[in-house]
Amino acid sequence: MKPYGFMIAGFLITMGTVGDRIGRRRLLLIGAAAFGAASIAAAYSTSPAMLIATRTVLGIAGATLMPSTLALISNMFHEPRQRATAIAAWASCFMGGTAVGPVVGGVLLEWFWWGSVFLLGVPVMVLLLVSAPLLLPEHRDPDAGRLDLVSVALSLAAILPLVYGLKEIAAHGPAPVAFAAIAAGAVVGALFARRQLRMPDPLLDLHLFADRGFTAGLGVMMIGAVAMGGMFLLMSQYLQLVAGLTALQAGLWLVPPSVLMIAGTMLGPWAARKAGSANVIGGGMVLAAVGMLVLTQVGAANGTGLVVVGLAVACLGLGPGAALVTDVVVGSAPPEKAGSAASMSETSGEFGIAMGVALLGSLSTAVYHGLVTVPPGVPPEAAAASRDSLASAVAASAELPADTAAHLLAPAREAFALGLNAAAVVGAVVMGGFGAAAVLLLRARRSAPAPARETDDAGEAGHAPVRAQA
């Protein structure tokens, strides 16, 4: 289990609502301090138990950062164009970290001890703690009510089993335990939703789903995350297990697609002003489908170029939607619910990635199991490993003579490539279909209500709220 990812997924909804209640800047500062301290503790962990504990704290602290920053942007920029541009810059920062992080981490692991990778975020957290009180106004919901701890417990009891089940399917394939966890999470989720609808001050305001733009935006975001979450995993595995690249080399090959996604994200608001948000979001998903069709042509030999080109086209298509859909979701909610809307936006993305890894990963694995063959003369242990997965085949081949290893890996790599092709076909169909649906749903969405003025705590800290100029 990976406690960091589990805690982020589990606490996003809670932290978004906590920010609405205690103030988004205050929660951001608390989370930044906890994240920096936990990063240092993780870097110098002296036992596996200590590392797990610090990673758990990192996940909880990390869950405060995304909804707080996104909610602050929503409150600071009321004019739609400025808000869309600010959200595009916010999304680009996350994508830039995703692109650069593995490369920088690989360099650190080459030259320093394993714990050094945890120290990357410490200077950023220190800078945030120094600058945020000076630059960021405080915003909160003056009528949020008390935090319902029963709802917090129910949200965790719903989300964590769902994420666990999806990750288990991705790691080990369909199994009764995984499906039982998903079913249990769904049941508790229904109880959570029922409680929220009956409470005057819910942890999660489900009435936000009455806005068609909000609901459609979350759906589009999740579908994009499903497709790209699964394909990025398969692309990384292809580059390392089929093309034979090191983790650092694979990370470098994946930088250009990430850079194009950042470029597309920053161009999204400009393109939306020319063609409309619905057309840009839907058209981008169709372009992403074209990129996935390119990935259906990747073979076991000399496929690195096609991987990079196909993934680059897909990332360029999804880039504009990454910002515009987030803007649709956050802009559809009233300002006092900005934290709750931001948390649902991030939770949708987290679930989408987990579902993509589980569903597309399972499809690829199923195709591999059905098509892989073992040549004669391979020892039984290596043959069994080859039938399990390509990663197991690569590990087993290290113990074999060069000729035998080559004969073992050739059909295994071919079967993996075919599994990747099958996942890309499904991804292309899903992206194309939902791209067309996104155009229709987002065009027809109702206009969001005029934002209500909310109480501002900034006067206590000597700051005036930022008001965007038309």
Image (cartoon, grey):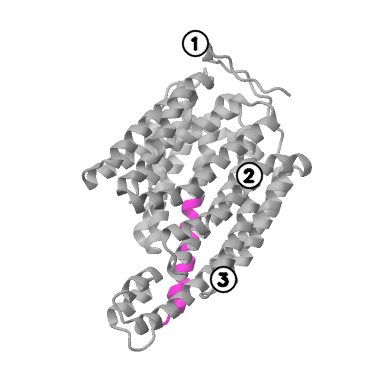
Tell me what residue is drawn at x 38 percent, y 28 percent.
33
266 in magenta = no
- Depth check: 355 or 272 in front? 272
Residue at image mark 1: 460
Q: Earlier in the sequence, mark 2 or mark 3?
A: 2
Q: Label 2 amino acid?
A: Thr
The image position of residue 229, as x and y in percent, is 51, 54
Would you say 154 lies left or right of 272 here?
A: left
The CA distance from mark 2 to mark 3 is 27 Å
Q: Label 1 amino acid?
A: Glu
Q: Is residue 81 above or below residue 136?
A: below
Would you say 425 lies left or right of 245 here?
A: right
The image position of residue 440, as x and y in percent, is 73, 48
User: Which residues fall within the magenta stretch?
Assistant: 353-373
Neighbour class for label 1 at 10 Å: few (<14), some, many (≥20)?
Answer: few
Extreme left residue here? 47
The CA distance from mark 3 to mark 1 is 59 Å
Would you say 41 lies left or right of 142 here?
A: left
Neighbour class for label 2 at 10 Å: few (<14), some, many (≥20)?
Answer: many
Q: Label 3 amino acid?
A: Val
Main secondary-structure element of the magenta-colored stretch: helix
Would you say 391 lies left or right of 232 here?
A: left
The residue tagged with tag 3: helix, strand or loop?
loop
The image position of residue 352, as x and y in percent, is 51, 50
Tell me what residue is drawn at x 40 percent, y 53 percent.
106
- Depth check: 231 or 222 in front? 231
Q: Is residue 141 above or below residue 184?
A: above
Residue at image mark 3: 298
356 in magenta = yes
Q: Earlier in the sequence, mark 3 or mark 1?
A: 3
Q: Which mark is residue 255?
A: none
Tell me what residue is drawn at x 45 percent, y 52 percent.
103
